[in-house]
Amino acid sequence: EAQVTQNPRYLITVTGKKLTVTCSQNMNHEYMSWYRQDPGLGLRQIYYSMNVEVTDKGDVPEGYKVSRKEKRNFPLILESPSPNQTSLYFCASSFSENTEAFFGQGTRLTVV
Amino acid sequence: QKEVEQNSGPLSVPEGAIASLNCTYSDRGSQSFFWYRQYSGKSPELIMFIYSNGDKEDGRFTAQLNKASQYVSLLIRDSQPSDSATYLCASDTGRRALTFGSGTRLQVQP
């Protein structure tokens, strides 16, 4: 089954404790993106990747890191999480920059 | 100016009516447009996509694109309570993949 898999689904952590949210897709897609979703603000792009070793900032990259060492994986790293990063996070993949995006199940992150 | 704009709603319609959802975009270079439906706490799922000016119909859904006015709409005919959700409009914005609007919340009243 074609899918985008994120883990974990839920995470509560403390300020400053490094964490990684994993994302994997099995559709051989070139593009992968991370979005955060907050009430009233919609989906805002954090980072995107056009291919292996090629990443770039989206609209809200501060406080986040990403890497794309393999085509299927695109982890999101929070080196020092802060409470303002409490949000619902989605990973998405697509064949190209102007085709349908497929979303993971989402990760609800709470930073206390 | 936001690249993709939507009225946040809520848009309330009675069951069986036509729901009309609207979206404007700022990048004249955008070529592809998408409508996603999102239930609370769930992932967005694709409803329709449209690339050409005019109308595109799929079952109860019709997407309309007017590139001259930079306007995209989604019509839902015979609205059902199960259509109650947030509808996200998205367009391509060059290399960055899809940019999303903030969504319109639709409430279909039984």
Image: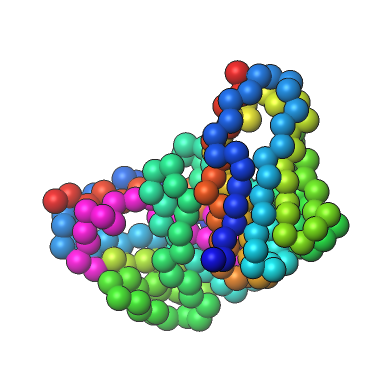
The quarter of the picture where the N terminus of chain A appears is: bottom right
Kindly tell me whether residue B28 is visible in this rendering: no
Left-right relation of A94 to B106: right
Identify the colour scheme used: rainbow
Residue A82 in the image: state x and y as whole percent. 68, 23
Q: Is residue A99 depicted above or below A88 in this figure? A: below
Say if the magenta span includes residue B91: yes
Side of A9 where B29 appears, left or right: right
Residue bounds of the magenta highlight? B77-100
| The image quarter in which residue A80 lies | top right
Q: Is residue A78 left or right of residue A40?
A: right
Residue, x 74% and y 21% (percent of image)?
Answer: A16
**Residue A91: x percent and y percent?**
62, 50
Say if the magenta span includes residue B4. no
Residue A87 rendering spot, x and y as whole percentages? 56, 34
Q: Position of residue B23 (x, y in %)?
A: 45, 60
